[in-house]
Image (tube, coloured by chain):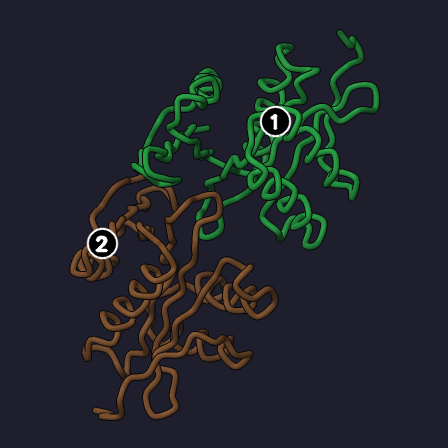
Chain colours: A brown, B green
């Protein structure tokens, strides 16, 4: 176990396209299409900055980026944020990095005036650990759209009032 | 009343930025921020084409663009579409143009393999006619997120199975 302190970084760098792809792929959790979408969000931020609507928080240990969260204000809302993505490289999972990243992201959203955080996840059984993770972070289910992603694969929306 | 036949156009032209702004503003229904978002969707399409995720259907009479719908496939889903926007210039409202635009858009989505169309609207009383319009087009409410847009202004999601 790497005992270097966990540090955070909000600035997005061109190398984050590759880092994000590596982390998301390494989890074994996401489809190739989802990996592409994850990288596109980084590219959008690199092209347009905060105006892209996608903000990032990277977790680093000893100079290595080991995980990240992607979130952003929802256009047309007063104080609602979308929590788009969180992934931790499998070599660093089980150490509470995801929970710490989430807490740090939440603190940034509160500081920016956010009052609600929303996230979507699949209703498929493989996402049960994801749903438990979010419930552990204080989210509650607020909507379910049947067959949204595909037949038998619904969208579950969670919200946290902050 | 203009008795020219109603025609449809899918190709997006640079002049549509101004046309969309004019139509959306003229309805008196949308905030300046919403007008900006409507125009941004046109700009996104002009910059990236269908890859923007925003598709358009314009309704024209005698060479004048009198209304439009904006929709697109939802990334990461098999056959779900978002119906983002529909507006008809007030000079041409009350003639069923909105309903025809919706029917034409739905036919295009079916032809492209879509199975579900989703749309979001505000829970505020002023949107009651909007909700009635969508119910008349076969949509049903499938989710409600309280205080989503602002305190007292929730998000109502509608779906149509096609």
| Residue under the point 34% across and 92% down | A62
| Residue A82 appears left or right of B102 | left
| Residue A157 appears left or right of B57 | left
Q: Position of residue A55 (x, y in %)?
A: 45, 65
| Both marks 2 and 1 on one chain | no
Count residues near mark 2 (Cα–Cα under 10 Å), then give few for <14, some for 14-19, many for 20+: few
Task: Tell me: residue B10, above or below residue A78.
Answer: above
Any part of residue B65 in sight? yes
**Which label belongs to residue B162?**
none
- Between the C-alphas of marks 2 and 1, the distance is 40 Å
State which quarter of the image contains the N terminus of chain B: top right
Task: Tell me: residue B11, above or below residue B5.
Answer: below
| Residue under the point 52% across and 79% down | A13
Q: Which subunit holds the residue at mark 1?
A: B
In the picture of the structure, the residue carrying the numbered disc 1 is B87
Q: Residue furthest right?
A: B63
Task: Tell me: residue B63, above or below residue B153.
Answer: above
Q: Secondary structure at mark 1?
A: strand
Q: Quadrant of residue B57?
A: top right
Q: Quadrant of residue A93?
A: bottom left
Q: Secondary structure at mark 2?
A: helix
Nearest the viewer among B124 and A87 is B124
Any part of residue B116 in sight? no
Question: Looking at the image, is mark 2 or mark 1 nearer the viewer?
Answer: 1
| Residue under the point 35% across and 34% down | B154
Count residues near mark 1 (Cα–Cα under 10 Å), then give few for <14, some for 14-19, many for 20+: many
Q: Position of residue A4 (x, y in %)?
A: 26, 92
In the picture of the structure, the residue carrying the numbered disc 2 is A125
């Amino acid at each position: 176990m790497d005992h270097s302190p966990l540090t955070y970084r909000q600035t997005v760098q061109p190398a984050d396209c590759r880092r994000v792809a590596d982390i998301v792929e390494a989890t074994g959790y996401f489809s190739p299409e989802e990996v592409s979408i994850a990288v596109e969000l980084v590219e959008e931020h690199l092209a347009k900055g905060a105006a892209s609507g996608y903000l990032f928080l990277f977790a680093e240990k000893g100079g290595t980026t080991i995980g990240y969260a992607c979130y952003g204000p929802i256009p047309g809302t007063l104080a609602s944020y979308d929590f788009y993505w969180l992934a931790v490289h499998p070599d660093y999972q089980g150490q509470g990095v995801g929970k710490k990243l989430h807490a740090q992201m939440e603190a940034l959203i509160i500081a920016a005036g956010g009052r609600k955080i929303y996230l979507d996840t699949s209703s498929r059984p493989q996402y049960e650990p994801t749903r438990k993770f979010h419930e552990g972070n204080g989210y509650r289910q607020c909507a379910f759209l049947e067959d949204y992603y595909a037949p038998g694969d619904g969208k579950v929306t969670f919200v946290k009032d902050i």
